[in-house]
Amino acid sequence: MSYGVEVKKVDKQGRITLPSNWKKKELKDSDEVFIIKEKGILKIIPKKKPDLTKYFDSVDLDVDFIEEWEEFEREFYEIP
């Protein structure tokens, strides 16, 4: 996919057509975008669901095994 500038016509209702190769690559299964309005500029950013599974093993709680959750929370949050 090439990046760059495309000239598009705006219809009477103010609509434009997104490039199909961009839609296929960036939107995939989504049909929503963020539109950021700035003076003289519109930015169209695909709305993607974040993959939270990549963060599952990134937090180290310094615990090998949690047997009693309430006890763990008290120690973790230092609740007397």
Image (spheres, helix red, strand yellow):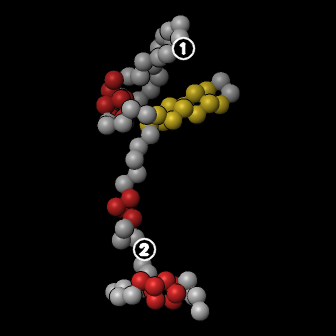
Asked which quadrant contains residue 21, the reply is top left
The x and y percentages for residue 62 are 42, 85
36 is higher (above) or lower (below) than 12 = below
Q: How many marks?
A: 2
Q: Residue furthest right?
A: 39
- From the viewer's perspective, is 22 left or right of 45? left
For the point 41% across and 29% down, the residue is 3
Q: Residue furthest top?
A: 12
For the point 62% across and 30% down, the residue is 37
Instruction: Inspect this view and state whether residue 50 appears.
Output: yes
**Residue 76, labelled with which disc?**
none
For the point 41% across and 22% down, the residue is 18
Q: Secondary structure at mark 2?
A: loop
- From the viewer's perspective, is 32 left or right of 65? right
Q: Residue furthest bottom?
A: 80
Instruction: Inspect this view and state whether residue 64 appears.
Output: no
Q: Amino acid at mark 1?
A: Gly
The x and y percentages for residue 14 are 54, 14
Q: Amino acid at mark 2?
A: Val
**Residue 14, labelled with which disc?**
1
In the image, 63 versus 20, the foreground residue is 63
Question: Mark 1 to mark 2: distance in Å?
Answer: 46 Å
Quarter of the figure with the C terminus:
bottom right
Quarter of the figure with the N terminus:
top left
33 is higher (above) or lower (below) than 14 = below
Q: Secondary structure at mark 1?
A: loop
State if disc 2 and disc 1 touch (CB < 8 Å): no
64 is higher (above) or lower (below) than 33 = below
Disc on the earlier residue, 1 or 2: 1
- From the viewer's perspective, is 9 left or right of 1? right
| Residue carrying label 2 | 59
For the point 42% across and 78% down, the residue is 60
